[in-house]
Amino acid sequence: PAEAVGDRRDETARRLVRRAAPDRPPRRSPTAPPEESAPGLSLVIVAPRDDVAVHTPDPTAAESLMASGTPHLYAGVVEGTGVVGPLVLPGETGCAGCLHAERTDRDPAFPRLVAQWRSGRQHRVPPPCDLALATTVAGFAAAQALAFLDGRTPSGTGARWEVSLPGLRWQVRPVRPHPSCPCGAARKGKQEHIPEDGGWRATMAGQGPSAEVRQEAEPARPAGTWRAHV
């Protein structure tokens, strides 16, 4: 909008989303108890701007979402690379903790590397990224979110999609439930919502909609309604 000329893009986008969001809940203090009649969030989109958080989602940042059983979708862009996923169904599919544990299995030094990366971050201003890539990632994340809210299981459920410049070729890697993760998805033995071959895909061709119905988040919401938070 014309009144936003000269403002930061992220701040302007946040204002527009809040202005356009239907039925946005009133702000309340973090210590205020939730209203019993208030519907729970159907989906939370976690979109960090820190490059370490995009590459390696912090499991502790999603503890409240996991504890409340709130589905959440990760998305982010770091310079020339964009990531969408995983879409986490708590207790059903692989989460950020599962991803961290799997990487630690492959490289026992991985937790120390992540700690060093995070301790060295001193930037207060979000790092730059390619505008066209960010728009592409945002559109794909929105499509994943809308498919989930429509009752389907999108391709990002239990998987991470990655795209890089200049080729913009999408690749996907499954995020499997890990036995050592406290989320409990591996112990429940639920079916994973990942590509059947379990490997990388060069393109998104052939990713048709799933017939599976998503798990409802708690607390239960009135039929025909949904709420998302970014």
Image (cartoon, rainbow, N blue to C red):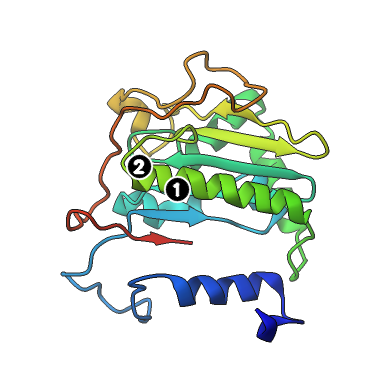
Q: Residue furthest bottom?
A: 3
When the figure is inspected, residue 81 is found, relative to residue 68, above or below; the finding is above
Q: Residue at x 55, y 77 (%)?
A: 15
Q: Residue at x 72, y 75 (%)?
A: 8
Graded by Cα atoms within 10 Å as few (under 14), some (14 to 19) or many (20 or more), the crowding at tag 1 reads many
First-in-chain label (1 vs 2) = 2
Q: Residue furthest right?
A: 166
Q: Nearer the viewer, residue 68 or 82?
A: 82
Residue type highlighted by circle 2 = Pro
For marks 1 and 2, give the CA distance. Answer: 16 Å
Quarter occupied by residue 219: bottom left
The residue at which mark 1 appears reads as 145
Q: Kindly tell me whether residue 58 is visible in this rendering.
A: no
> Residue 127 at what x, y percent from top left?
77, 61
Whether the residues at callouts 1 and 2 have beta carbons within 8 Å, the answer is: no
The residue at which mark 2 appears reads as 90
Quarter occupied by residue 171: top right
Q: Residue furthest top?
A: 197
